[in-house]
Image (cartoon, grey):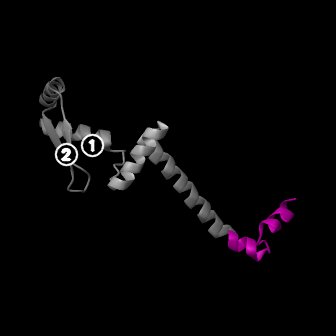
C-alpha cells in the first residue's frame, strides 16, 4: 500500500510504502480507536517527522555531499550537522565581536598587541 501525506503548510507530498503485515496492524488499531486508517497513518508520519527538518539541496550540493560522504565514510546527515554547527558558532562569534569591538575601541584597545598588554 502507498500512503501520501501533506507536509506542514506546503503542497508537497511524501510517499510511504507500508508492508502488508504492518497495514493489517494499522487497520486493527484504526478499527479499535474508531478512526480512519489514513488518519492514523498520517498521524504516525507527522509524529515521526515532527521534529525533523527536511532539506532540499540543489543537485550540485547533493553531489558534493555524496562524494565527501563516500570519501570520508561520514554519513551525509552528520556532515550537514557539523557544517550547520560550525556556521552557528561563527554567527555567535560575529555577534559577540559586534558588541565588544566598539566597547574595546572606546577603551583604546584596537590591536591584538593592545589586548596582550592589558591581560599580561
Query: Residue drawn 41% across and 50% down?
Result: 64
**Helix, strand or loop for disc 2:** strand
**Helix, strand or loop for disc 1:** helix
Residue 23: where, in percent of width, then height? 15, 28
Query: Residue drawn 69% across and 70% down?
Result: 101
Residue named by callout 1: 46
Tag in front: 2 or 1? 2
Tell me where the magenta segment starts and ends, as one range.
Answer: 101-120
- Counting every numbered tag in the picture gives 2
Using the rendered view, name the quadrant where residue 2 is placed: top left
Q: Quick one: which residue is furthest to the top in this view?
A: 21
Q: Is residue 118 magenta?
A: yes
31 versus 4 height, above or below = above
Residue 108: where, in percent of width, then height? 80, 75
Residue named by callout 2: 5
- Disc on the earlier residue, 2 or 1: 2
Q: Which quarter of the image is occupied by the N terminus?
A: top left
Using the rendered view, name the quadrant where residue 9 is placed: bottom left
Q: Please state if 94 lies on the left or on the right of 115 as rendered.
A: left
Q: Are marks 2 and 1 in contact (CB under 8 Å)?
A: yes
Q: Please state if 58 lies on the left or on the right of 110 as rendered.
A: left
Q: Please state if 43 lies on the left or on the right of 102 as rendered.
A: left
Residue 20: where, in percent of width, then height? 14, 26
15 versus 30 height, above or below = below
Q: Distance from label 2 to label 1 (Cα)?
A: 9 Å
Query: Residue drawn 35% across and 51% down?
Result: 55
Taking depth in this image into account, of 15 and 47 the one nearest to the observer is 15
Query: Residue drawn 39% across and 44% down?
Result: 66
Residue 14: where, in percent of width, then height? 22, 45
Amino acid at each position: 500500500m502507498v500512503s501520501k501525506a501533506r507536509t506542514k503548510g506546503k503542497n508537497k507530498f511524501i510517499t510511504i510504502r507500508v508492508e502488508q503485515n504492518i497495514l493489517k496492524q494499522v487497520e486493527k488499531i484504526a478499527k479499535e480507536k474508531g478512526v480512519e486508517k489514513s488518519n492514523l497513518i498520517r498521524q504516525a508520519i507527522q509524529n515521526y517527522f515532527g521534529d525533523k527538518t527536511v532539506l532540499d539541496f540543489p543537485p550540485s550540493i547533493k553531489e558534493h555531499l555524496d562524494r565527501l560522504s563516500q570519501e570520508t565514510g561520514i554519513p551525509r546527515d552528520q556532515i550537514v550537522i557539523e557544517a550547520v554547527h560550525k556556521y552557528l558558532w561563527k554567527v555567535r562569534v560575529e555577534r559577540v565581536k559586534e558588541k565588544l569591538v566598539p566597547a574595546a575601541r572606546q577603551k583604546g584597545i584596537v590591536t591584538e598587541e593592545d589586548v596582550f598588554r592589558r591581560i599580561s
